Image (spheres, grey):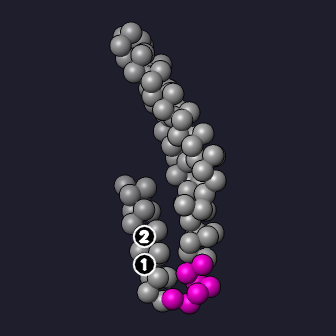
Amino acid sequence: MRSDPAKISRLLKTARGQIDGILKMVEEDRYCIDISHQLLATQAILKRANRNLLTDHIHHCVKESIESQDEGDIQTKLAEIEKILDELLK
C-alpha cells in the first residue's frame, strides 16, 4: 500500500468511533433522523478514505505499470480500477 498509512488509519478509526456512537444511539432508541445523519457522516469518512486509497493507487501503482510498459500489468491495473468504479457507481 502506497497510501499514507497514518492518514488512512486515522480516517478508519474515526469511522469506527462514529459507528460505536451510532450503535449506542440505536440502543438508546434515539431519533431516527439523528441516527441517519450520523450514518451519512460515517459514510462520508469511508468515502474519503477510499478516495485517498484509489488516488494514491493511480498515482503510484498504475503510474509504475505504465512507466514499466508491462502491457499485461497495465491491463490488470485498469481492470481493477474499472471493477472498483463499477462498485462505486452501483
Crowding near the residue tagged with mark 2, few <14, some 14–19, many ≥20 C-alpha atoms within 10 Å: few
User: How far from the left and from the top, in percent, is residue 52?
Assistant: 59, 54
Q: Residue at x 48, y 89 (%)?
A: 71
Q: Which residue lies furthest to the top in this view?
A: 28
Check if mark 2's residue and mark 1's residue have beta carbons within 8 Å: yes
Instruction: Give the amino acid at mark 2.
Output: Glu
Instruction: Identify the mark at residue 65; answer none if there is no mark.
Output: none
Quadrant where the N terminus sits is bottom right
Q: Relative to residue 58, is residue 65 depicted above or below?
A: below
Do we see residue 20 in this rendering? yes
Q: Relative to residue 37, is residue 56 depicted above or below?
A: below
**Could you tell whether 24 is left or right of 1 in the image?**
left
Residues drawn in magenta: 64-70
Q: Looking at the image, which is closer to me, 13 or 42? A: 13
User: How far from the left and from the top, in percent, is residue 7?
Assistant: 63, 46
Q: Relative to residue 67, is residue 7 depicted above or below?
A: above
Q: Does the magenta stretch include residue 66?
A: yes
Q: Relative to residue 68, is residue 17 depicted above or below?
A: above
Q: Mark 1 points at which residue?
A: 76
Q: In which quarter of the image is residue 30?
A: top left
**Could you tell whether 62 is left or right of 29 in the image?**
right
Q: In which quarter of the image is residue 85?
A: bottom left
Quadrant where the C terminus sits is bottom left
User: How far from the left and from the top, in percent, is residue 78?
Assistant: 47, 76
The alpha-carbon separation of the residues under discs 2 and 1 comes to: 6 Å
**Could you tell whether 82 is left or right of 7 in the image?**
left
Instruction: Give the amino acid at mark 1.
Output: Thr
Do we see residue 48 in this rendering? no
Q: In which quarter of the image is residue 28?
A: top left
Q: Characterize the magenta stretch by its predominant secondary structure.
A: helix
Q: Which residue is drawn at 39% across and 62% down?
A: 86
Q: Name the residue under label 2.
A: 80
